[in-house]
Image (cartoon, rainbow, N blue to C red):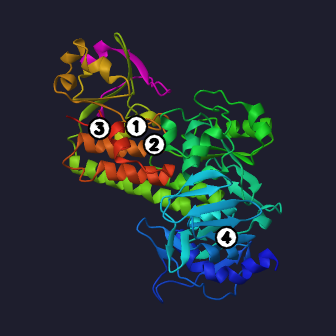
Amino acid sequence: MNKTLLLRKTLSLLLAVCLTAAGFAPAAAGAAPPVTVTLDGAPATGGTAPDAEPYTDSAGRTMVPVRFISEALGVNSVNWNEAQKTVSVFSDKAKIVLTAGSDTMMVNGSQTQMDTAAVVENGRTFVPLRFIAEALGIGAAWDGETRTVALTSAAASASGETQTFTDSVGRAVTLPADITRVSPSGHLAQRFLVAIAPDLLTSLGSAYNPPNDKYVPEDLNKLPVVGSFYGSSDINYETIAGINPEIVIDLGDPKDTVGEDMDSITAKLAIPAVHITAKLDSTPAAFRALGKLLNREARGEELAQFCEKILSQTNDVMKAVGTNEIKALWVTGVNGNEVSIIGSNEEKHDVTYSHSEVIDLVADNVADFDVLGQRGSGNESDFEYLLGVDPEFIIVNSGVLKNVSGNTTWQTLSAVKNNKVVEIPSGPDNWMGSPPSINRFLGLIWLTKVLYPDQAAYDVKAEAQEYYRLFYGKALSDADYAELTANAFLK
């Protein structure tokens, strides 16, 4: 039977599954308008009930029978090995092997981390829908306004169909309808893309070196490193052109020239480039825009909702704190009398300094400079400046603490004298913002609790572990958390 026809005849069976995977639980009868299902833009109907019902496991993932889903999506074969408790799914694109009770999945010989485990119930193997669908290259998108589930087959993706995407600076860009190969513009965009669609990445702005590589999907460091358009400004156009991605995606604060910059990348590579603005407070919107662009709307919504939860939680704490913000300082480096400090965004500056957004939000950042340093190290200053502002609390980058706590000169500062100096956790990135990307949400979770433990009534470890599961696809063990936060709290 034609695989597209088979898909059409079984699509109605996937409806409940797709809705749940997209973060929408089935509504009670009469509680919501009916839902339309389409395949490659055409209405999809027909089919019979699946031989086992999907359900939501303890991790909040929708579990579906692997044989039903795989056959409905038109794969070549599905084999069960009773002795090894493995199920193998074979398609033209991928060989997928899952083991009952394991939270890892093998795709074409490479291990993929899942955030839940395949299980056997009543003689059937159940798996998380999202991981199987992504491995097979099947797109599923939810349109909340029209209540439509849109499935995109691989055949449609290869047909040359296009979409028009309007980026954050108003550039209307024509792109493939189903994007399968993406290159980030640099370090910030890389973090977003690792979270929402690591399987689409064709390159990295920078590698994850040991020990930080243990926190991210194993296959990432197999990708070529091509540098960054902004920041280090070492982007390698020749390598990107050789990789031939379908799109270059830039995320972060919009530079004044960002429109011209994206046009320049497009001209040099003959590959479209788009910018999506992603400040701290607009990160949820950025994930939703990415989800729509990449046909990963369910995943984008999941990540956006986590970010919204943390922003709301932080704002609630700061409302309770009121005018009693702690005077704090972020020291990124110490070299004798020279000190590197992250300056404040507030009042006199009409541009966003993304590195300081977290400390400006949850503290009174006493570092006040006429001109802000635009790199991650901040502004260069000296110890006399620190004496003048005399912060109540100091946070320092990894490796700096030994230069502070053991220095008798620093003992004259109130924060040091009162043992109110902590080290920022770092792995795979600095939690406060180096680079100033999605890792800053870990900074919000951590620093708010450190500064205001009475008002911040939540468990940092639990929220950090949820973050690592969602954004890196990794389980953060208690031992790893203890190592990351060894010097991160007052003792």
Disc nearer the start of the sequence (2/3):
3
- Residue behind mark 2: 439
Disc nearer the start of the sequence (1/3):
3
The residue tagged with tag 2: helix, strand or loop? loop
Q: Which amino acid does label 1 sit on?
A: Met
Give me the C-alpha separation between circle 1 and circle 4.
47 Å
Give me the C-alpha separation between circle 2 and circle 3.
18 Å
For the N terminus, the image quarter is bottom right
- Residue behind mark 3: 363
Q: Is residue 36 above or below residue 230?
A: below
Residue 461 in view (yes/no) = yes
Q: Which amino acid does label 2 sit on?
A: Asn
For the magenta stretch, what is the residue range?
Answer: 362-388
The residue at 76%/40% (across/down) is 243
The residue tagged with tag 4: helix, strand or loop? strand
The residue at 57%/85% (across/down) is 34
The front one of 279 and 87 is 87
